[in-house]
Structures are given as C-alpha cells and as structure tokens.
Amino acid sequence: MTQGTDRSRAFSTLVLLAALLLLPAALTAGPPPDPLTETVAALQRDALASSRAWEVLESLTVEVGHRFAGSSGDRAAVAWAERTLRELGFENVHTEPVTVPHWVRGEASGETLSPFPQAMELIALGGSVGTPDEGISAEVLEVGSLGDLEALPEEQVRGKIVFVNQQMERTRDGSGYGTTVAIRGRGPVVAAGKGAVAVLIRSVGTGPQRFPHTGGTHYDDEVPKIPAAALAIPDADVLEAQLRHGEPVRFHLRLTSRTLPDATSANVIGEIRGRERPDEIVLLGAHLDSWDVGTGAVDDGAGCAIVTATARLIGDLPRRPRRTLRVVLFANEEFGLSGARAYAEAHAEELPRHVLAVESDLGAGPPWRFGTRWAPEARPVAERIAAWLEPLGVELSEDEIHGGADLIPLAPARVPVAELPQDASRYFDVHHTANDTLTQVDPEDLAKNVAAYATLAYAAAEIPDSLGPAPEVERRQGR
Ligand SMILES: [Zn+2]
C-alpha cells in the first residue's frame, strides 16, 4: 500500500516536471491543430483499424462473383448492392435502370496446327463474333503493333490470322495499359480492313501467369466483323518462338461467342446526406459490373468496397459533413460505359451541384498519388488535402488527370474531378482474367485506400470553398 502511494506520488511529480518542461514548447509550437485536421486524423485512424471494406468485398465476391453486363450475375449484383447499402444504413438507396448490351462468351479454343501442334490458352475479346462452327484455320501473320499492320500491303494480310504481338510495359501508374490497349480495341477493325480472317493479340497485361486477359473490342460497319481473341502471355511467347523457326505457322481458332438483345441493369445509389447543403453532391464512384471471368475482386469489387466503406465511415462521424456524399455503383463500365452515360443523362439538371466526383477503379494496391482537375483558384485546397494525405504515403501530382472512366460523361458539365489511383504495378497481372479473385487483395492496402478516400471525400464535403468549374477537356476517344 505504502509502496503504491510512493509510486503514485513519484509519478505525479514526474508528470508535473514534464508539464513544466514542455510548457515553453507548447507556447512556441503555434496554434493547436484545427478541427478539420483533427477530424481527418480520426477518420484515417478509424479507417486503418476497420475491416469494413474487406467485409463488403468478401460479401460481393463470395455471394455474387462475376457480374458481366446482362448476365444473371449482373442482376444478382444489383440486388446485392441495394441490400448492402440499406444494411449499412445509407439514405436514399435506390436503383436507376440502365440498358446494357448483352454479349455471351461461349467457348474458346485454339491451337497451332503446324509446324508444331500445341493447344493454346486464349480468351475471346468482349464483343467478338464467333467463328463458324468448325472454327477458322489459317496462316498466322505476326505484327509488332497496329502501326506496323496499317503499313502492310493488303495482299500480305488477306486470308491470314493476324497476331498483334505488342508487349505491355509494367508501370506504377498503369500508363503501359493506355499505350497498348488499342491493339485490343481496334485490332479487329484494322486487321479486317486489310482482309484478315481473325485476330489474335498478346494479352494486354503483365506477368508470366498463364491467364489470358479479356476486355472489350469494337467493330465498325465499314469492314467485316472478324473473330478476335487474346493469347495468355506464355502462349504468345510460344507462338512467337514457333514463328521464329521461319516456317509458316498455321493456327486453328474456334469461338462460339454471340450477341443477344440488350438487357436491363441498374446504377445503384446510396447517400450520406449533408447537414447544411444536402443538395451539393460529392460523388464517390466505382463500377459494379465485372468481366465474366474471375470474381471481379480487383476490378472493380475493390473500388465498390472502398467507396462504400469511405462514405459509411464519414457518416459515422459525430457531426456529418456539410454536403451530401453520394455513392454511385455504376452499371456496365467494362463494355461501353452504359451506367456512366445513363447517370449523366438522368442527373443532367443536378450536375452543376456536383462539387466533386472521384472514382476508384485501379484495383486494390496502396494509394500513392492524388491528382485533381478542378478550378485553378482552388489549388490551395488540393495542397491542403495533400498535406493530410502525406502520412499515408500519397503525393500530390502535378499532371493533368482525367478521373475514372465513369466520370468521362460528366466532363462536358465541367464537374470537378479528383483521382486517388492505386499503385498499379501488379494490377495488370490479374486484370480481366480468371485470376482476379479475393486472394489477390491485401486487406491492409484496402484499408489504406479507405483512409485516403475518406480524407479526400470528407474535405470536399466539408470545406466550404468551391472547386469548380473544372477546366474544359477535349472529348476523349472511344469508350
Ligand atoms: Zn474497372
């Protein structure tokens, strides 16, 4: 007893001493942190300690799985999202109908017939027509890029299966995708324009895994629609090596893909209403659809989980932010941005009151960069937010950004946009493959994303300054 009292007395003396020692420092350290900074710090702490995003992602990938536009998984995902947002206590939860294309993959197979017969891992590109039932057999013509293909005389291409063998570069910002993806989108039109009978591409992806990468392709009415497939990277290597032998390589391709009549899907929306200016919207977007392989955990289940957990976390604050946070889980991003276009149309009248839009659609790696496209006069707000993001390892980007694909239709209304992209170094190893599953996601990185998105979303919903209008952008090509 006595000993304890002595100890507590000694402790009190120490505390007093420490307080006296720290007093001058406290007097010179400037004002205490402002309430906004304190709230942001609390949000970050709570986000890093929470597993909510992981739980949402697990629920989506386990209970629904993949959810390609028009499929039964798509319908299940819409029901799942509506239910989940309600269960999490969002307000104004509802769906908005979206007409989507309905392409069905069917089966895909391919093999080299000569000089060395080998079965190949390949996958139809989204939207591809099928081959005749017996498949197509033809000699392979390899090109290094679409530019090389465009430069070839028609007689060299006619009747061939064109193999576009362009390698995608691994980069942290995912820019390797942007410089390569045209082989997938435009390969069939360019090849058909030269008389080719089918197209094979090296998968637009990275890594040595033997999973072919799908993704949307396009046709136009000027040239025949020819079947198109992507080879897994190791299989593209084998085909390339066979071609190096110098003898003609014959290939057999069979696809049973087909397009059905349009289907109906939906954007799913839920809100955390603002306390003071509920009509002003901070849009937090991700796309609910995925390709029809894997479970869409990385693309874009992670984004759905991040924005949902972010809005919920901010809604749990003792005092809500000034403006409304609106979570929008877009329908069919992957095969034509149908949900994004439908949203921009349905909410056209309201777009001037969208104070910021941000989309998470680059997987589940750690966040590392923060970029904006908003009024130049609001640059100090970006700098202020960047200072809050710094402890999370996120740096302010000077580059011009576009925001997520689903935000493209908001650009004509000059809605301010921001980006908090994930580190994409490994993203394209699994992107659009059967290997895109929950196993690829690190729960800690997911929580870090919520901390970063919550910082940005809270700031945009609370700081009274206007961020808009965003500078005008030239309309981007394609979909
Ligand atoms: Zn995506």
Image: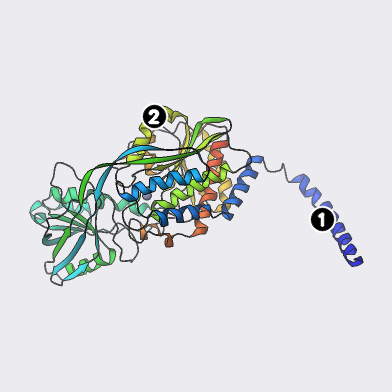
Find residue 234 and report its horizontal and vertical position in percent.
28, 67
Mark 1 vs mark 2, foreground winner is 2
Residue 129 badge = none
Q: In which quarter of the image is residue 348?
A: top left
Q: Which of marks 1 and 2 is nearer the N terminus?
A: 1
Q: How crowded is mark 2: few (under 14 residues within 10 Å), some or many (20 or more)?
A: few
Find out if the beta carbon at label 2 lies less than 8 Å from the nearest ligand 1 atom: no
Q: In which quarter of the image is the C terminus?
A: top left
Find residue 365 and report its horizontal and vertical position in percent.
46, 56
Find out if the beta carbon at label 1 lies less than 8 Å from the nearest ligand 1 atom: no
Is 8 on the left or on the right of 88, as rendered? Answer: right
* Secondary structure found at label 1: helix
Three-letter amino acid code at the position of disc 1: Ala
Vertically, is 456 above or below 151?
Answer: above
Residue assigned mark 1: 18
Q: How crowded is mark 1: few (under 14 residues within 10 Å), some or many (20 or more)?
A: few
Pick out the residue farthest to the top.
Answer: 349
Label 1 and label 2: CA atoms lie apart by 60 Å
Find residue 133 and report its horizontal and vertical position in percent.
12, 57
Q: Is residue 396 visible?
A: no
Q: In which quarter of the image is the N terminus?
A: bottom right
Three-letter amino acid code at the position of disc 2: Ala
Q: How is the image coloured?
A: rainbow
Q: In which quarter of the image is residue 135?
A: bottom left
Residue assigned mark 2: 348
Find residue 223 and report its horizontal and vertical position in percent.
13, 45
Vertically, is 410 above or below 63?
Answer: above
Pick out the residue farthest to the left.
Answer: 155
Nearer to me, 258 or 184 = 258
